[in-house]
Amino acid sequence: MAQVTILRGLTRTAEATAPSALQLLVLNLMPNRAQTEQQLAQVLAAGKRPVALTFCVPDTHHLRHNAAAVRRAYAGFHDIEDQHFDGLIITGAPLDRLAFQQVDFWPELHRILAWRKTHVTGSLFICWGAYAAGTIDGLFTGQPLTDKISGVYTTGGLTMPQSRFFKIPLTSVRRGQIITGSSALGATFIKDLATNSWYLAGHLEYQTDTLLAEYQRDCRKDPTTPKPAHYFDQNRQPQNTWRRDAARVYAGWLQTLVPRRVKALSSGLTYGKE
């Protein structure tokens, strides 16, 4: 397994890392931030590339959970905007039932996505992060849903948990390459080579019981909530059928970041600052 170091985050593991480690910035928009940190660390550790993670939050985002602790542990965008990173990850967020203009950090997200084109080698967007980034990038026009897509689905040979109130219709994708998708689920994985950006409609980073916890939470609000599809076995136990695909996709994305890192190291350049 590869070494994963968390430089800034609620579950920080170190303040320094190996020079060969890929430097990744993670805009963590999930409410359960510590759990999301560990989910991403776990899926990245399954690859061969050592990585160092810096977790951040938008400066203009009103934090509802553990705000003081998060602000102490995380970088704000103003802290890192003069730096370069090998990769940017933007997580999902429970915001897909809001209009984009109702999201408090929506203007700042525009700035971050413009910034990443000159300060980041490649980007990976997850669930709502993909929905928002693809909209801002003009890649596609998403479709809000009233019924949640919840479960584990396989499209184009890729198995991935889905938990969302939006859809990216295949016909709405204006550029980039649709890697996987279906008419029912929409595009589930899109690559835009022009910006080296990957858009995942689902959550490959989810652990085995994450969808179960979400289902139980939703049932407390509405006992008629449908069970996540293709997730439980005959004994009603959750099954992780996506672990191998998660490791493959993340390893593939990290590989797209390596050429710039190798070039910088071989030339003796100091990488990480402008």
Image (spheres, helix red, strand yellow):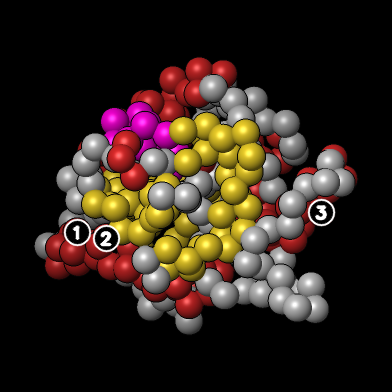
Q: Reply above or below: 176 against 67.
A: below
Q: Is residue 47 magenta?
A: no
Looking at this view, is 194 or 52 the one in front? 194
| Residue 52: percent from left, percent from top | 44, 61
Label 2: few (<14), some (14–19) or many (≥20) C-alpha neighbours in 10 Å: many
Q: Which residue is mark 1?
A: 260
Tell me which amino acid carries mark 1: Arg
Residue 91 tag number: none
Q: Earlier in the sequence, mark 3 or mark 2?
A: 3
| Residue 211: percent from left, percent from top | 69, 59
Q: Earlier in the sequence, mark 1 or mark 3?
A: 3
* Residue stretch in magenta: 129-142
Q: Reply above or below: 254 against 130.
A: below
Q: Which residue is mark 3?
A: 216
Q: Is residue 5 visible?
A: no
Q: Residue furthest left?
A: 267
Q: Residue furthest bottom?
A: 1
Looking at this view, is 145 or 175 the one in front? 145
